[in-house]
Image (cartoon, rainbow, N blue to C red):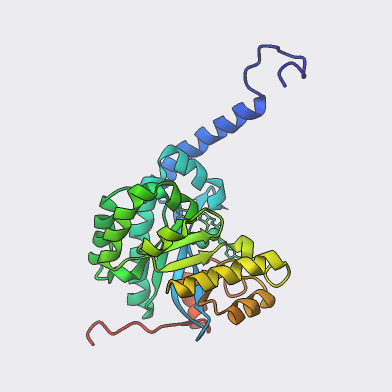
Amino acid sequence: AAKADGRNALQLFHPDLIGRSREKLEIETALHKALERGELVLHYQPQIEAADGRVRAVEALMRWRRDGALVQPGDFIPVAEETGLIVPMSEWAIGEAARQIAAWRDHHGLDLAVAVNLPSRAFERFDLVEQVREATRSLGLPERALQLEITETALMRNIDQVIPVLHRLTQTGVEIAIDDFGTGYSSLAYLTQLPIRELKIDQSFVRYLGEREQSTAVVTAVIALARSLRLRVVAEGVETPLQEQVLRGLGCDTLQGRRFAPPMPAEDLARWLERGGRATPARDPAG
Ligand code: C2E
Ligand code: MG
Ligand code: MG
Ligand code: MG
């Protein structure tokens, strides 16, 4: 490209590349400040039980309030992962999710579990267990109020370091889900040995459900696999009545997607539930 544009034969980097790495550096610096200034927020998306329509858990999805705009995770999580900033950001997310669970309980009488997305780096650290314990215990929450999601790809990439931490986590009561299931390369042998509770079917398979044979075949197989391993199965990215109908017909336990509700700020979620979305009533702490 340097020669072809005929300006400078010694040009080492295409201007686009320089632009991209400078942008990355800018995002990194800005993210650092965002974390310190409290510009990161979690939005929450309900997971609907197919059997009774109730919401027992919500997924926490991170957003960045940057100069009045809401930046989506696709535009900052990859940089956070590359630079390692994802580690303090994950710590923040665990603490924030726990505070929110306590707030829903105390102010709205709601008993909700929150699923937090974590990168594999977080699962390589033994102190993740202490951190989760501390976050729940200090607020009087049961550990099962926090669920953790790790993508299939991240899990398999670091499986040896992750396994012992998974075991210690599940001993405390925290439940683990494999996210974006079907897009990575899980060994079926691992699946039977890992202390996981849930498979989340990737939205790329849900998108053409009922329309494309291959999607329907993959989803059918994942649900059958989950059933025989006694794992819960959640479909994400459910948008249409057809997708819902097919998933229900296949016996999918839990449905998540804009068909039901988008990710929402915590207050909106409480209002949504009060308007008719159904959640399990909080257990009376005295009773
Ligand atoms: P994910 O964990 O698989 O999250 C599901 C994504 O699907 C979310 O995108 C959600 O907003 C989106 N979604 C919800 N309903 C629908 C629907 O009906 N149709 C479609 N097509 N999509 C739907 P989002 O919020 O942009 O997050 C993207 C990814 O970024 C997440 O995928 C997750 O891998 C990552 N992420 C988000 N928050 C965090 C976080 O706090 N920590 C880490 N490490 N990663 C995060
Ligand atoms: Mg997720
Ligand atoms: Mg997911
Ligand atoms: Mg996904």
Is the residue 281 above or below the residue 26 in the image? below
Position of residue 55 measured from the top left corner of the image (x, y, whole percent): 47, 78
Considering depth in this image, is 201 or 189 the residue closer to the camera? 189
Q: Is residue 269 visible?
A: no
Asked whether, in this view, residue 270 is left or right of residue 215, the answer is left
Q: Is residue 41 visible?
A: yes
Is the residue 276 above or below the residue 36 in the image? below
Position of residue 34 measured from the top left corner of the image (x, y, whole percent): 44, 46
Considering depth in this image, is 230 or 77 the residue closer to the camera? 230
Q: Residue furthest front?
A: 189
Asked whether, in this view, residue 59 is left or right of residue 286, the answer is right
Position of residue 191 measured from the top left corner of the image (x, y, whole percent): 42, 62
Label total for image: 0
Indicate the quadrant where residue 196 lies: bottom left
Indicate the quadrant where residue 258 lies: bottom right
Looking at the image, which residue is at 29% across and 68% down?
173
Looking at the image, which residue is at 35% across and 51% down?
162
Looking at the image, which residue is at 44% across and 51% down?
156
Position of residue 180 measured from the top left corner of the image (x, y, whole percent): 53, 59
Q: Quadrant of the C terminus?
A: bottom left
Is the residue 17 above or below the residue 253 in the image? above
Looking at the image, which residue is at 38% across and 71% down?
113
Considering depth in this image, is 192 or 133 the residue closer to the camera? 192
Asked whether, in this view, residue 87 is left or right of residue 13, the answer is left
Q: Quadrant of the N terminus?
A: top right
